[in-house]
Image (cartoon, coloured by chain):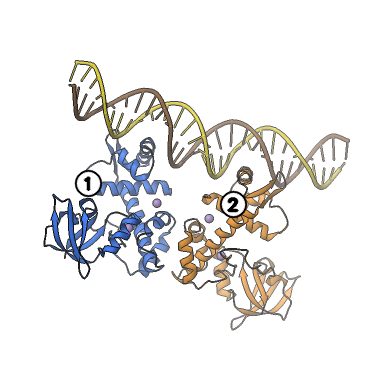
Chain colours: A orange, B blue, C brown, D yellow
Amino acid sequence: MASSTVEDYLKRIYLEQQRSPDTLVPMGRLAEAVGVVPGTATTMVKALADSGLVSYEPRGGARLTRGGEQLALHVLRRHRLVELFLVKVLGLDWSEVHAEAEELEHAISDKVLERIDALLDRPSVDPHGDPIPPAKGRPAPASRRSLADCERGESIRIARVSDQSPGFLQFIDRCGLTPGIVATVDANDPQADSVRVRPRGKETVTLGAAAAAKVLVEVA
Amino acid sequence: MASSTVEDYLKRIYLEQQRSPDTLVPMGRLAEAVGVVPGTATTMVKALADSGLVSYEPRGGARLTRGGEQLALHVLRRHRLVELFLVKVLGLDWSEVHAEAEELEHAISDKVLERIDALLDRPSVDPHGDPIPPAKGRPAPASRRSLADCERGESIRIARVSDQSPGFLQFIDRCGLTPGIVATVDANDPQADSVRVRPRGKETVTLGAAAAAKVLVEVA
DNA sequence: CGATTGACTTTGACTACTCAAAATAGTAAT
DNA sequence: ATTACTATTTTGAGTAGTCAAAGTCAATCG
Ligand SMILES: [Mn+2]
Ligand SMILES: [Mn+2]
Ligand SMILES: [Mn+2]
Ligand SMILES: [Mn+2]
């Protein structure tokens, strides 16, 4: 059985790998993501390599093996199903479920997970729009296009919000830019470093480029 | 924050204390209950004593302090609410929820616990008939009288089953002796070391004294 | 080329938890 | 009052995970 520490490392490596595919995840990045000092990450990754869960190149970085990826996806599946469950069944706010799921993802058995999946009617995305990995196999690739990449006049649908911090999620909520919503891009001025967007039926909002980059979209 | 290990020790001490009130819990008993060797329990209990959660008398045993008891009750509340939740909301069998709750009891936040409590409509007993400790204060004292203590002809109600092992619970289920059921005692022969009992609307069943002692009752 | 810099690795130490096995202290029996 | 038995405690060692700080590597820059 993988400890919850190991599960968190694998999940983190997976997510970092998604952000820049075909590259090794450097130890500094991983340490930052997991919340430890770099030396700790090095030590841990060497142990993971010994268990065959990652491959490790000294001074290069780490990459998940097939086995490590499967485990990471299983953790991610638990995390995201739990998040959706907390929102849909227990009525928590989408801004607070990430922290809850961070613990619960390690305590849910396969049996309970299956019940949750059934109760939610086999959902495919979590409250933040992130794809829920299937019980086996890889998840559908998620949108990589953000509001910051949109042209003026485009009509798009909000797909995911890639920042889990409660404050940002609450802000997005107030703007009405939650996943699923259709919106039109009123302006995108690189010089002004900002994007103006109008969610259907709501008022126009202006986001700085950094914020806009955290809101992923798909064609409406 | 108390680790899950600490939480389990405290819970175990509490439960052993319930079984024989006004006595210290000896280290052998505690070690057995927690699933470690006696030396480990001694070490741990000394650490708990240093944190003020238990009082410890060498070669006597341990007892919870007020603080330790509160923590133990909080863990027990989570454990039992989770059990009921798993049965009522996710449809698991009462014979399997104990093992699940053993993990989940350490991962549930106060907020989630409150939602579960509300969703279940502030229940007072878990699927095995054990009282759910209130958010603050002590739980109602549970019945201590067992089927083995009943007289022939008595009409009683099954209150709790004090053995959480799946096999025993499934057996009890088949007999129809689940908590809440009313039954009449057909015979209780100390010589035969067995009790015959007839659950309302079901067939008479015969239990050995040891099994009967694990089925707690109250006046019907 | 050599020096500087910044990321990475190594080392040593610490906390939390555990077991095996030896030492000890009561208790019970001779 | 010894002796024997049993529960408990102590000791020594090991695993998992972590940090601080010192050491190393390699890329970059003068
Ligand atoms: Mn986690
Ligand atoms: Mn999410
Ligand atoms: Mn537990
Ligand atoms: Mn129970």
Numbered circles on residues, count: 2
Which residue is at a point 62% across and 73% down the rendered structure image? Answer: A159
> Residue A74's image quarter?
bottom right
Q: Position of residue B73 (x, y in %)?
A: 32, 54
| Three-letter amino acid code at the position of disc 2 | Tyr
Q: Is residue A121 left or right of residue B151?
A: right
Q: Quadrant of ligand 2?
A: bottom right
- Subunit under mark 2: A
> Residue B204's image quarter?
bottom left
Residue matched to label 2 = A9
| Three-letter amino acid code at the position of disc 1 | Pro
Q: The residue tagged with tag 1: helix, strand or loop? A: loop
Q: Position of residue A97 (x, y in %)?
A: 50, 64
Q: The residue tagged with tag 2: helix, strand or loop? A: helix
Give the answer, above or below, for where A209 lies relative to B51: below
Q: Is residue B215 visible?
A: yes
Give the answer, above or below, for where B115 lies relative to D24: below
